[in-house]
Amino acid sequence: MKQMKKSIDKKTIFRKIMQSLPAASAAIAFVIYGTTFLPFSADRMKSSVALIESVSYYEILSGGKPLVYCRCLGDSCLPEGLSPTAGQEVMTKSYATACWVNRYPLFPSCPGLLITAVNDSAEVKAEALANRDIRQTIKRTADRLAERLKNLENSADETNYYLSVHNVNDDGYNVMAEYSEQIKEKISTAAAMLTTLRSIQDKRQTEIRRVSRHTLLYINASGDTVRTACRMLTPDHSQPLRLMQTADKEKPDGASAIYLHTWLSPVPDAGDTVFVASITGCSLHGNTAPAVTPKVFAGAATGCCGHDLPPLLAPDGSPVFSRWGIPAGISFGGIIINPAETGFALKRLLP
């Protein structure tokens, strides 16, 4: 009888344990989820941001082989700043603030993931227009280059005439001689590119392609600036926010990734204090790299999910925190983009 009672008791205990498992699992999940809302200190806010250097240029290809390079596409979508090589003269460099992000909302999951703001939709549209009638684009580009070559030859004639009626003892002769050599070099380069463009302007496998390269810049524990290659993951160029990943899929030691929660993220009311962590003025430096020194600035939320910090202090891509230090979104154009816009597990930013 006692053995039977013990057996019943064991079954009852087991049944109660099994019945309580869902509630216990939910409680554990709730606690874990709650820890992802822990506030950031000012130092952690700073360590959540990084600097992205972007370099772009265009290639003119035939049969998949790049033959001529250019800096940009002009108003008429014609290549400008032609060069036979992909050197510094054709590269456009820019900088942007980015922040480290966890992919999943329940646990640390940052395999080198960064969110930033890269607004290159205009360049993508120009590239598409240039390729829509690529033969005409190449022909017009060659015609403009032929005109430039003609002007260079006229300058060469004028320079040669000057050198023919003066000698090395005359003031300015050496300067003109040096200038003459520069013109000759430009004529040689332009003539070679013109020959190339004329040879491919009627070929079908000709295209213009924009090339972009991205590099993460951050300061390591030793105080040295480290450069790490990144790749763009978000294919949609119309997205205000873009997801990037380091080539090694690693987050540097000391970096803090934020959680972009689809639910329960704080929404600051107008007048509430907000904090923005950023690389100040990174988008205003042109080709000069700003100091890789994150800073935190206090501001106030405004109506329509905005904030009152200027772009110099809150460049696009900067994380915004509530007055309690909880991530509230990403700054873009003075607006705080709600984390829900990125989708669960960042799915709206992934391919």
Image: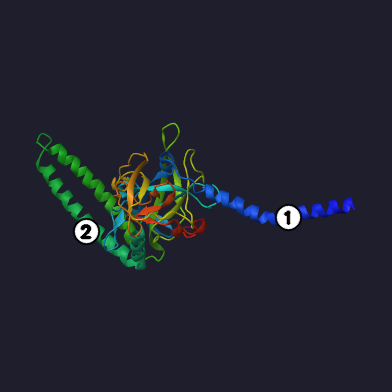
Horizontal side of 188 relative to 328 (left or right) equals: left
**Which residue is at the front of the view, 348 or 118?**
348
> Is disc 2 in contact with disc 1, using a CB cutoff of under 8 Å?
no
Residue at 32% from the left image edge and 53% from the top image edge? 271
Residue picked out by circle 2: 147
User: Helix or strand or loop: what does disc 1 sit on?
Assistant: helix
User: Helix or strand or loop: what does disc 2 sit on?
Assistant: helix
**Which residue is at the front of the view, 64 or 295?**
295
Callout count: 2
Q: Amino acid at mark 1?
A: Lys
Q: In the image, which disc is placed on residue 16?
A: 1
Residue 37 point in image, percent of width and height: 49, 49
> In the figure, 292 relative to 340: above or below?
above
Considering every residue shown, the one lying at the far right of the view is: 1
Residue 123 sits in quarter: bottom left
Is residue 39 visible to the viewer in this orientation of the structure? yes
Horizontal side of 63 relative to 142 (left or right) equals: right
Is residue 314 visible to the viewer in this orientation of the structure? no
Residue at 47% from the left image edge and 53% from the top image edge? 260
**Which residue is at the front of the view, 138 or 198?**
138
Residue 89 point in image, percent of width and height: 30, 47
Horizontal side of 253 relative to 56 (left or right) equals: right
**Which residue is at the front of the view, 341 or 65?**
341
Question: How many C-alpha atoms fall within 10 Å of the one at disc 2: few (<14), some, or many (≥20)?
Answer: few
Residue 265 point in image, percent of width and height: 46, 54
